[in-house]
Image (cartoon, grey):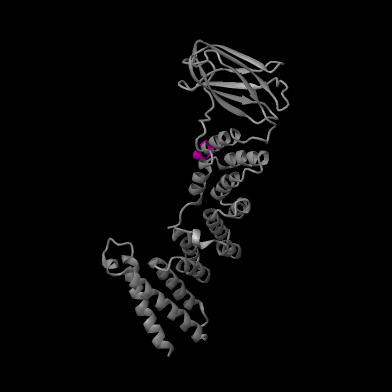
């Protein structure tokens, strides 16, 4: 039942670049398909309006995904001839400046376009650098080269420290490497910058549980605005994780949170009852009243689960069917245990 954190984070991170043009690197300069009779030219300036020499411009003819490169002159100027008419993607690169990408139509209303582009000091504008770097990192993750992908995100974050979603991407890599405490630290930095993002707060809590930092996990979940939680699984998930780790007392708190937010969620009562039953088994046998209290709590939750699950739980295809069978077995067991405590 536990969802994989990294997939959720990837989705969230990619959505930040939605609507941006593709940032694929161009193919070899001599590749056929981009030559023609067209031309274009331009100039690159800095924020003060001064020419920027030594800028590498990669030209990608979109239909062929290929094209040449040029380098700006001492006057920041460049020119490209013998190119095909159509849509081109121009990528500007120079150390110390933010890379840029712009689309240019050759042979349209302006047959020979002349483009003046202003480059900003590196760390100012992440609009191209971050999506481009994300594409490179994603390709590395597909190849299971997690450390290399993490290095890209780490460098991007150092360059653009206010781009908070980079913490999500870095957290994803650390999670995949099993570095859960470090992953949680990155999520905490994101949450600090975006305190209203309840979904990531839930991820933060589950990441703390993976790191066995149970107090921090509960603190993260306790700070949730429950009214904004629309999926019971967001609250049940840490409980499932904790039950599998035999942390019934911790698991109980999360299922109790689910019941508070979703009082008609049958499964939450079932699993809270399971937690109570396990807790009864961990109490010293001489503490009969404490054992009794846990058993009675479990009994009440199992009965509530059966009430909410209703007759449909008798259907083998109903997801509650297996739990209904087990709930009845637990109730029979509890009845015997309670009679022995008298």
- Residue 65, how many percent across, how many down? 48, 23
Q: Residue at x 43, y 73 (%)?
A: 273
In this view, the residue in front, 169 or 61, is: 61
In this view, the residue in front, 258 or 137, is: 258
Taken as a whole, is the magenta stretch helix, strand or loop?
A: helix
Q: Is residue 56 above or below residue 246?
A: above
- Residue 141, how many percent across, how many down? 52, 40
Q: Residue at x 62, y 40 (%)?
A: 151
Magenta span: 139-143
* Residue 220 visible at all: yes
Tell whether 300 sits left or right of 128: left
- Residue 239, how many percent across, how many down? 48, 64
Q: Is residue 159 above or below residue 227?
A: above
- Please tell me in which quadrant of the rendered image residue 70 appears: top right
- Please tell me in which quadrant of the rendered image residue 335 appears: bottom left
Q: Residue at x 64, y 35 (%)?
A: 125
Quick one: quadrant of the C terminus? Answer: bottom left
* Residue 326 visible at all: no
């Amino acid at each position: 039942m536990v969802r994989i954190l990294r997939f959720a984070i990837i989705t969230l991170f990619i959505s930040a670049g939605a609507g941006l043009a593709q940032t694929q690197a161009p193919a070899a300069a001599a590749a056929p398909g981009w030559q023609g009779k067209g031309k274009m030219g331009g100039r690159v300036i800095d924020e003060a309006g001064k020419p920027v020499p030594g800028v590498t411009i990669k030209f990608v003819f979109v239909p062929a995904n290929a094209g040449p490169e040029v380098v700006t002159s001492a006057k920041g100027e460049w020119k490209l001839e013998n190119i095909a008419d159509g849509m081109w993607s121009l990528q500007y690169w120079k150390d110390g400046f933010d890379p840029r990408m712009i689309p240019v139509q050759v042979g349209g209303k302006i047959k020979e376009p002349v483009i003046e582009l202003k480059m900003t000091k590196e760390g100012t504008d992440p609009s191209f650098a971050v999506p481009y770097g994300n594409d490179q990192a994603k390709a590395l993750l597909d190849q299971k080269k997690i450390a290399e992908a993490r290095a890209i995100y780490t460098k991007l974050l150092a360059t653009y420290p206010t781009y908070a979603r980079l913490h999500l991407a870095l957290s994803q890599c650390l999670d995949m490497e099993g570095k859960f405490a470090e992953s949680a630290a990155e999520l905490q930095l994101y949450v600090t910058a975006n305190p209203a993002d309840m979904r990531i707060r839930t991820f933060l809590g589950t990441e703390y549980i993976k790191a066995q930092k149970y107090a921090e996990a509960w603190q993260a979940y306790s700070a949730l605005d429950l009214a904004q939680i629309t999926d019971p699984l967001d609250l049940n998930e840490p409980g499932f994780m904790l039950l599998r780790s035999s942390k019934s007392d911790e698991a109980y708190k999360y299922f109790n949170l689910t019941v508070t937010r979703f009082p008609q969620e049958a499964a939450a009562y079932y699993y809270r009852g399971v937690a109570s039953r396990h807790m009864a088994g961990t109490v010293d046998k001489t503490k009969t009243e404490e054992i009794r209290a846990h058993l009675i709590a479990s009994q009440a939750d199992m009965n509530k689960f059966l009430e909410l699950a209703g007759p449909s739980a008798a259907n083998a295809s109903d997801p509650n069917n297996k739990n209904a069978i087990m709930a009845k077995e637990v109730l029979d067991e509890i009845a015997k245990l309670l009679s022995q405590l008298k």
